Amino acid sequence: MEGREAKDLLYEQFARAAKAVSSPKRIELLELLAQGEHTVEALARATGMGVTNSSSHLQVLRGARLVGTRKDGTKVFYRLAGDEVAVFL
């Protein structure tokens, strides 16, 4: 990858991350996930949001590559995508 293309990709990812954390509720979700992985239901309870709203916020964070998921049966567990996300937070 050439210099300009690499820079453009880096700037795009930075903009996605900045947009994703522009919501106070998303920052709260990230803070909770920094403490360990949780289901969307547990995150919804902890934040006082509905499951649908929490899930929408988590999808934005996932799209920005700030969170990852793990499936266990019918449950989906969310976690920070890596230690660098905790540093970013």
Image (cartoon, helix red, strand yellow):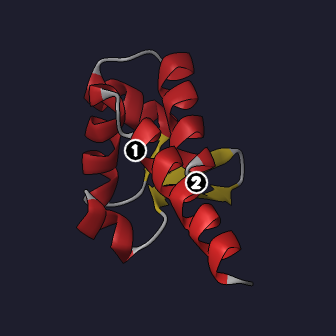
In the rendered image of this protein, does residue 68 appear above or below residue 28? below
- Quadrant placement of the N terminus: bottom right
In the rendered image of this protein, does residue 14 appear above or below residue 40? below
**Mark 1 crowd level (few <14, some 14–19, many ≥20, 10 Å Cα):** few
Q: Secondary structure at mark 2?
A: helix
Residue that sits furthest to the front in the current view: 4
- Residue plotted at (34% across, 53% down): 33
In the rendered image of this protein, does residue 4 appear above or below residue 34? below
- Residue plotted at (26% across, 37% down): 28
Residue 73 visible (yes or no) = yes
- The reply, left or right, for residue 66 in relation to residue 6 is left
Q: Position of residue 26 (x, y in %)?
A: 36, 35
CB atoms at circles 2 and 1 under 8 Å apart?
no
Residue 65 visible (yes or no) = no
**Dot 2 corresponds to which residue?**
12
**Dot 1 corresponds to which residue?**
18
Q: Quadrant of residue 27?
A: top left
Name the N-terminal-most of marks 2 and 1.
2
- Residue plotted at (66% across, 58% down): 72
Q: Secondary structure at mark 1?
A: helix
Is residue 87 or residue 10 the one in the foreground? 10
| Dot 1 amino acid type | Ala
